[in-house]
Image (tube, rainbow, N blue to C red):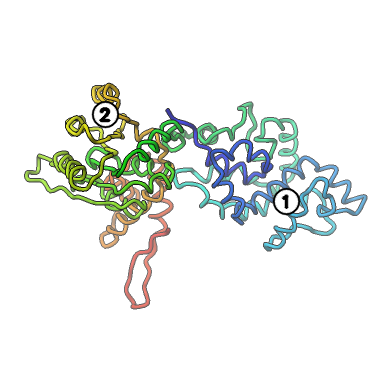
Amino acid sequence: MTVDKRDVVATVAYMIGVRKETLNKYYEESCSELLETLYNDQNATTIRYLCKLRTTLFQKFKKTDYEMKYNLSNLDRLEEWYDTDNIKKLESWGIPIIQVNYSSEKYMEDFTRLINENIDKCEYLFHDWVKFEYIRELFCIPKHTKKNVFKSEFEKYMKNLNNYPFQMYIYWEPRERGNILFNDDKFLSIIYTQHKDYFWDKSKVKDADEDTKADIYEFIREGYKVAIAVDCENSDVFKLYGVLKNLNPDELARIEKIMLYDDYHTSTAWEWLSKFTKIPVEYIEVNRVTELKSLVDIKMTAGVCTAFYKDGIDSFIICSSDSDFWGLISSLPEANFLVMYEYSKCGNPIKEALEEHDILNCAMDDFCTGNATDLKKAVLIDKLKSYAPQIVGMNGRELARKLYGDTRITTTEAEIDNFYNKYIKTMRLKINEDGVFYVEVAD
């Protein structure tokens, strides 16, 4: 079973200015650490305060204009409507808010301009696999300096107030979609569709349910010594990393080590895993006697038996979809096993055998892969740098496709294009302090 992720929608809700009580009600349970990070992030909070000011101004446009024109008031004295603490904080950050002899329309122009100028500073808050240009458009009113643009937006907003998320203003064509910030899947599907695009990778916005995670934690706690044994030929490194990223670090700290049994034909990303987890990683590269025959399954079987009899490890998390490992499991009845497989690689007979013998099992596919971006990025950029000496004359888009192929990362053309635009197009030839040329790749 899987549950819907809410990281993207919680971030957007924070940035458009949704009230703290509402944020806590809808997102605190699943995104408490994320919300705490956003509250302490100046760039995200800048956009949040500006969006709150703009939404309030839309709602109180005529009344604000009247107060400034006839009662010589200003936003910082209209405390009933505007959060003056937010205004003071923005000005302390060097963002001018209060102006003299102003009108509501001029303030609206200012807030919109300031949002446009600062929104790109928030791109890092979203994963690389999210098209930030679609997010940006929710905040930026195009051609806002032209006559009647604000009037049109004001009328659209006020007529469709309940079709805006939590009644906060965003730039979009309002429709009856319910709460578009309900979860990441719904939100991304809607904004991609508005651009005649399709958000396809549901694995990035779904995660294993709490019962599955609780079973894994219980397995780890009940073991005297626990190790993860990985058949790298029959496992996806990014799916395994997604599993590790979505489990409680305190529970994972009980695991003695990860044993990687690898063949040189697999993804080079396995060699990077140790840099991205605090669990000790033992990397075992298995050489072939003949090119046609891999020995990974035999070597891993021997390694698990050695760990059990010699090292005292009594509990193993086996990461493989290969039915050959049923022989290992059935031959070590004294050991405890949990099997993690992939749907596309694991047949029904092995699943039925695991269930019949009460062997705990789960699918790595059920865990969110959306936060595996850091490992993917490191692997791809490392591979990109390896092409630097021969890069002249190569086609950049073909190079991007080759990088994904070399690292065996399954993806879409859209994600390849995003990598091309963000990292390949921005490559620069630099020279270091010793006068040596090198190619710089953006972080």
Q: Which mark is residue 346?
A: 2
Q: How far across and down, in percent of the image, does residue 101 sit?
A: 85, 57
Q: Nearer the viewer, mark 1 or mark 2?
A: 2
Report whether residue 264 is seen.
yes
- Can you name the residue that lies furthest to the left here? 290
How many callouts does the rendering have? 2
At 9% from the left edge and 43% from the top edge, which residue is drawn?
291
**Residue 431: image location, x then y, percent:** 36, 72
Quarter of the image where the N terminus is located: top left
Q: Quadrant of the C terminus?
A: bottom left
- Per the image, the residue denoted by label 1 is 109
| Residue at (24, 36) in percent of width and height | 335
Question: How busy is the neighbourhood of tag 1: few (under 14 within 10 Å), some, or many (20 plus)?
Answer: some
Callout 2 secondary element: loop
Please say if 163 is above or below 438.
above
User: Residue at left 58%, top 46%?
Assistant: 35
In the depicted view, which residue is nearer to us: 423 or 144?
423
| Helix, strand or loop at mark 1 | helix
Relative horizontal placement of residue 339, taking residue 51 as reference (left or right) = left
Among all residues in the image, which is located at the extreme bottom? 434
Badge 1 amino acid: Glu
| Relative depth, front residue between 427 and 262 | 262
Mark 2 nearby-residue class (10 Å; few <14, some 14–19, many ≥20): some
**Which sits in the foreground, 325 or 62?**
325
Q: Quadrant of residue 334?
A: top left
The residue sitting at 29% across, 61% down in the picture is 388
